[in-house]
Image: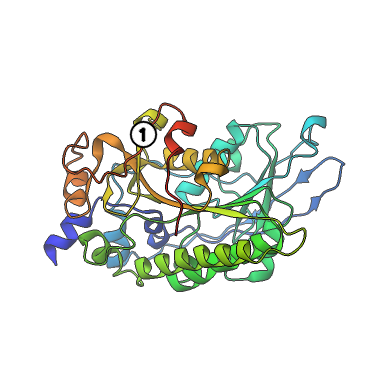
Amino acid sequence: KAIITLVALSFSATALHAFSPTPAVLQQQHSIRSASSALQLRATAESSSSDVTKDTSSTCRRSFLVGASGTVAAAALSLQQPALAADDTKKQPICVIGCNGRTGTEVVKYLIAKNEPIKATSRTGEYNDAASVPAGAMLEQLVCDVTDPKSVQLACAGTSAVIFAASASKSGGTPSAVDNAGLVNVAKACMDANVPHLVVVSSGAVTKPSSPVYQFLNLFGKIMEEKVKGEDAVRKLYAEHNANLGEGGQKLTYTIIRPGGLTLDPPRGVAAIELNQGDTKSGRLARADVAQLCVESLNYPQVTGETTFECYDADTGAPLATVGLSNIAKKKTDGEVFVSGFERKGSTYEELFTGLQKDV
């Protein structure tokens, strides 16, 4: 068990932030004026703070973060947003489910940088990094609890894409409720609303129960089991939907991304990333790079649609049996340790994604 713990320490998948102690829930009331007039968002929060007892599992989970540092900026008490520019009135927003997670926050930041309209959703209805949102950003804060199908439907309606970056948490739901059933709720809502593309942030090693990474992470509410169940359900739902299109029916697609050990390092960019398929290899990757993969995959649905792939920095790639140890040592492997035959690299995202095999 000690060896398993050591090997897995540095493999920080998206699920890991879910078990860290979270700030007290901010209660708020906000109103949204929509249509073609100016969009005004106002979030007024009352916060109460209390010391949260750190249990053993929380301490273990925080140790997974490779070089984790920094804190999320305090949410703005008042955020004014201008009316959409004339050229943007026809653009549907991209919905980010779980905008306050570490990866979800990076997704929102990248979308803002690309001047995309965004629905930033969370259980509280508040984007915690709102203080850093620049003037003119097209950001809408919205309540979305993935365990509540009605709130999910409202969040997904009228969007061009949905990025699922949520995971289990102490106050937000178990792995079964969030990573499995919650993801299914989101997928169904996307289909009901004819959302063209759903991107899911999952985790590497979810299909390898004998790997040290899987065995350790699965101790936390069987999260790995629930994640792969959620993945399988998404693949099945979309296959059935697209196989039974009626007259005028719209084909919809999904992309499942399985990052390796997540860091808070600056993004290294597309040229540093390696993709793999088959869940046999992993490494380390900045959350900011995962965010870019999520958003950029929406631009190439013809090659990313109906695919599942792992991602990590190419010079950290290693087989699952040893990746935990190499991550702990922050070792550069240069891909020499193991070659699966399914690696993909590129100098552009289109090149990186081209050649991905479709899910069966």
* Location of residue 127 in the rendering, given as x and y in whole percent from the top left corner: 60, 49
Identify the amino acid type marked 1. Lys
Please give left or right for residue 68 compared with residue 360 in the image: left
* Location of residue 151 in the rendering, given as x and y in whole percent from the top left corner: 67, 65
Question: Residue placed at 80% from the left, 43% from the top?
Answer: 39
Q: Nearer the viewer, residue 44 or 214?
A: 214
Question: Residue placed at 21% from the left, 33% from the top?
Answer: 334
Where disc 1 sits, the SS reads: loop
Name the image colouring.
rainbow
Residue 168 visible in the picture:
no
Q: Quadrant of residue 333?
A: top left
Crowd class of label 1 (few under 14; some 14 to 19; many from 20; radius 10 Å)? some
Residue 37 visible in the picture:
yes
Please give left or right for residue 244 compared with residue 54 in the image: right
Q: Quadrant of residue 111?
A: top right
* Location of residue 321 in the rendering, given as x and y in whole percent from the top left corner: 18, 55
Which residue corresponds to mark 1? 345
Question: Residue placed at 21% from the left, 66% from the top?
Answer: 210
Question: Residue placed at 67% from the left, 57% from the top?
Answer: 156
Q: Quadrant of residue 311?
A: top left
Q: From this viewpoint, which residue is outermost toward the left?
A: 3
Quarter of the image with the C terminus is bottom left
Q: Is residue 224 above or below residue 260?
A: below
Q: From this viewpoint, which residue is outermost toward the top?
A: 347
Q: Is residue 143 above or below residue 99?
A: below
Q: Nearer the viewer, residue 11 or 297?
A: 297
